[in-house]
Image: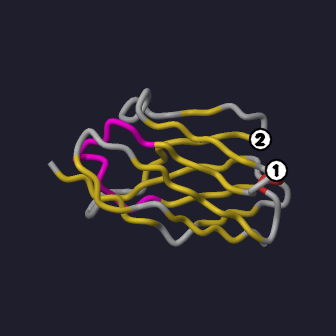
Amino acid sequence: QVQLVESGGGLVQAGGSLRLSCAASGRSIESSDVMAWYRQAPGKQRDAVATISRSGRTYYPDSVKGRFTISRDTAKNTVYLQMNSLERDDTAVYYCYHRQILPFIEVWGQGTLVTVSS
């Protein structure tokens, strides 16, 4: 079973950058059909902000496109989220997510808080 541990969150000023890390254990991230970063702000639903497929294809919603970049290091079994030009609306708890299709397995990390101040 994959376990995910996020790190790298914190307080940053608007316009600044942060890099989140998601360290996987128990199984290689190469077994993942999808790795992703989600975020959830208070009172809002949890939404994906970056996904990367097994083939390396990435997806970003318009709200973060051009500012966020997802990447993976299979040697370190870690997925990253580079966040640039941060805005106050980026304030949220960020979660790492793993999905395997066969057999179907979904795993969430515990989350890391990102706070963007003006």
**Mark 1 element type:** helix
Residue 42 in percent (x, y) is at 27, 63
Residue at image coords 40%, 35%: 64
Q: Which residue is mark 2?
A: 54
Residue 107 in percent (x, y) is at 65, 66
Is 87 in the magenta? yes
Q: Is residue 1 left or right of residue 88?
A: right
Q: Which numbered tag is attached to residue 30? A: 1
Q: CA distance from mark 2 to mark 1?
A: 7 Å
Q: What range is drawn magenta here?
A: 83-94
Residue at image coords 80%, 52%: 75
| N-term-proximal mark, 2 vs 1 | 1
Residue at image coords 56%, 33%: 59
Residue 33 in percent (x, y) is at 76, 47
Badge 1: residue crowd in 10 Å (few <14, some 14–19, many ≥20)? some
Is 39 in the magenta? no
Front residue (pair 71, 109): 71
Q: Is residue 22 above or below residue 86?
A: below
Discs 2, 1 touching: Cβ within 8 Å: yes
**Mark 2 element type:** loop
